[in-house]
Image: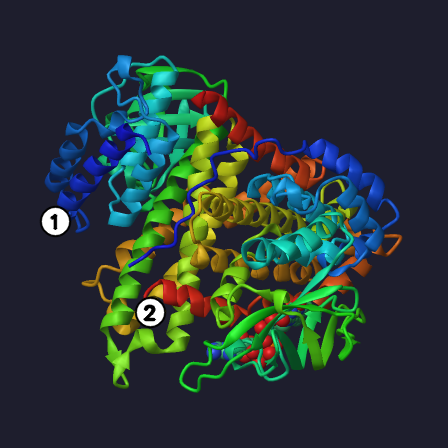
Amino acid sequence: MSEHRAMLLDMVDKLFTKLVENGVRDNLSAEDFSRHWRAIEGLGLTRLLIPEQAGGFDGNWEDAGPVFKALGSYGITLPLGENILAQHWLHRLGQDIPEGIIQPAFAESRTGDVLVLRNGAGFAKAQWIFALEPDRWSLLPTGNADRSPSAKSGAVLRCNISTSVANGPLETGDRAFFSEAALMRACQIAGATETMLRITLGHALDRTQFGRPLARFQAIQHQLAMLAEENAAASCATASACQAALAGDAQFEMAAAKFRANRAATLAADIAHQVHGAIGFTREYSLRHFSQQAQAWAREFGNERHWALWLGRFALEARPDPLWNWLTARSDDVLAREQRGQS
Amino acid sequence: MMIPDFPPIRVLPEGAPERENIRAFLDEQLDPFSPAERARSWSACDARFSEELGKQGLIGLTWPEKFGGKAASHLVRYRIVEELLAAGAPVAAHWFADRQSGTMLLRYASERQKARLLPRMAAGELYFCIGMSEPDSGSDLAALRTEARRDGEDWRVTGSKIWTSHAQHAHYMIALVRTGSDESDRRTGLSQLIIDLSSPGVTIRPIEDQTGDAHFCEIFLDDVLVPADMLLGEPGNGWAQVNAELALERSGPERFLSSHVLIEEALKALSENPSETLTALVGHWTAELWTLRQMSLAVAGTLERGGDPMVEASIVKDLGAQFEQSVPRDLQAAWDQADIADESGELDETLTYLVGASPSFSLRGGTREILRGIIARGLGLR
Ligand SMILES: Cc1cc2nc3c(=O)[nH]c(=O)nc-3n(C[C@H](O)[C@H](O)[C@H](O)COP(=O)(O)OP(=O)(O)OC[C@H]3O[C@@H](n4cnc5c(N)ncnc54)[C@H](O)[C@@H]3O)c2cc1C
């Protein structure tokens, strides 16, 4: 690992440890939220993928992946990943980065100048929306948006495009952003499965029943082995997709990583809860910050059905080239580019 | 607490043949084989193919040149092996010699035996089999009873082995046998011998499996003479040696490619725009295959750097077997005549074969339960 990256991850570990001590996982008041967010912004983390000469951290996907993963392993749901990606994209699109929190959102429909956006509860905390249509982007202040009365927790927003402070065509298309956001979520899931594994191992070693620790029962050992397998798959898939993203086009790898991480999220959560027994089901206990959050992340930016169909069409369209041929060609290409980059 | 680690591979195999060249060679060689025959791959023996591969210099690649190898890295071998398996080449004849017996000889055999055996193994002419399991000793390998007694400097072996893959074609077996007895620890007093299967006192009987193939065998050993310099390594060191041997056979591409021929054949037979169920299944396969290959390559990278990824290798094998077993099962469940063109019946035949063969994927080379036990030990649970 480069020194630059080791420093970054060390900084992130310290910051996240502190945030967790200060209650970042609890239900946050607006004030608490701002306090935590200022701590993150103070370190310049939202500028992770912006070049140095533009005042950024000069990071790449192999720096961002571990940061996203750390969000998952610490159980932190602040929209850092979203802001890293939104700032990265705005910079690439030649746009100055505005002050405040940006929420990326995909347009569900457009009638005249009115965009209908749907993107979970994130809008409540954001000052800006980075709105993506299939071939256009716009940056909109949330202040002027109309929160649909029918939608729960502000999940649907109506925005008038005329209020945008900037907009333009999207040459890559909005799916490129969707894939990157999917990989971000996949990394977060991999972090969450790792913590599920750690705390479930700890619990199995501590908790005694029938006069011995749960860890001594073979049925429990095998469950934990399977949890470790799922964590390994999520971790390797996401790290490999970040590696591919750094080398070049990685839409396939991002899709595969999100699909695999989604599967790991549910299998890991199932095992972690079972091994914990009732204590893991309480609000007080920390497991839910990982088990429930991993599954929420699995639903966002493409569930398994979405990515399985996307990957299936990708493989079918590649015919008559055998699956094996393009799969190995892609991975050889990643390594070749990486080696060229180093030399 | 140790969390198993899979750092992505960072290097291309240096000096490896181009995939295109390997594929051109395989296309030509495998033309006469039906898909169901190719699906057998490392369960199918073909002396002519192994010899041809030896001529191409593609066996024993990692061995020193003086023993017929190319002194290539394990990553070079990985590329060749994954191409052979993805294409469904009938590699079983030389498979065990190439994957593990050769390495065991290099580590532990006398110089004379290395010089005598390795070059012919690399030529694809001399085959080895693995004599570990016995009738009363499967997962519990240390319970084995086949015994070797001293006869002067030499050994006399009596007992039996079972499930020995391709023993009927093999020239030699590396057998784990009991050479001493220690009631308190069954693992001491085990040794590895290279047994010449043409020796007097050796009887080999193939056993038909449920698909009708006969690849594994029973071997009876009745006072078989084994010369002193056919002992592998140190007497009494067999347990440690065999565990090192098992590490060579757990994370390779054969642990997730056993159903690959079926995947490629299904893709060929699927219509232009198949049902969502079938499309999603193909998507699922690509994601799993890509992930497993990345994991297996990560372990190969760790091995190449001299690490000891015992737990990671067991993870690859267990997840890989689950995937290989899911492929025929899920294709059968999603099969839809309207979307699949299989006039020749070849896809159906391949599927039927793999439904029959796939239960063995989580038995051979260490069962699912044994692997999970190894992983649990690595996690500090036992
Ligand atoms: C196709 C094929 C090829 C083979 N080739 C070879 C070969 O070339 N050479 C060779 O030596 N062997 C070979 N084997 C044998 C193979 O290694 C054994 O089948 C395997 O080690 C399991 O032993 P067993 O079949 O006796 O099953 P058993 O050990 O009797 O196991 C039966 C079941 O009990 C479970 N079990 C056993 N012990 C435990 C435990 N402690 N905890 C929990 N569950 C347990 C097992 O996981 C399994 O599910 C081959 C097997 C197959 C199927």
In the picture of the structure, the residue carrying the numbered disc 1 is A21
Q: Residue at x 38, y 71 (%)?
A: A221
Q: Residue at x 64, y 39 (%)?
A: B70
Front-most of A120 and B155?
B155
- What amino acid is labelled 1 in the image? Glu
Mark 1 packing: few (<14 Cα in 10 Å), some, or many (20+)?
A: few
A85, above or below B231, in the image? above
Q: Is residue B359 visible?
A: no
Q: Quadrant of ligand 1?
A: bottom right
Quadrant in which residue B179 is drawn: bottom right
Choose top left, top right, bottom left or bottom right for residue B75: top right
Image point (60%, 44%), residue name:
B62
- The percent position of residue A164, horizontal first and vertical second, equals 33, 18
Q: Is residue A134 above or below residue B186?
A: above
Mark 2 secondary-structure assignment: loop
Residue type of the residue flagged with mark 2: Leu
Q: Is residue B136 above or below residue B349?
A: below
**Disc 2 sits on a residue from what chain?**
B
The colour scheme used to paint the residues is rainbow
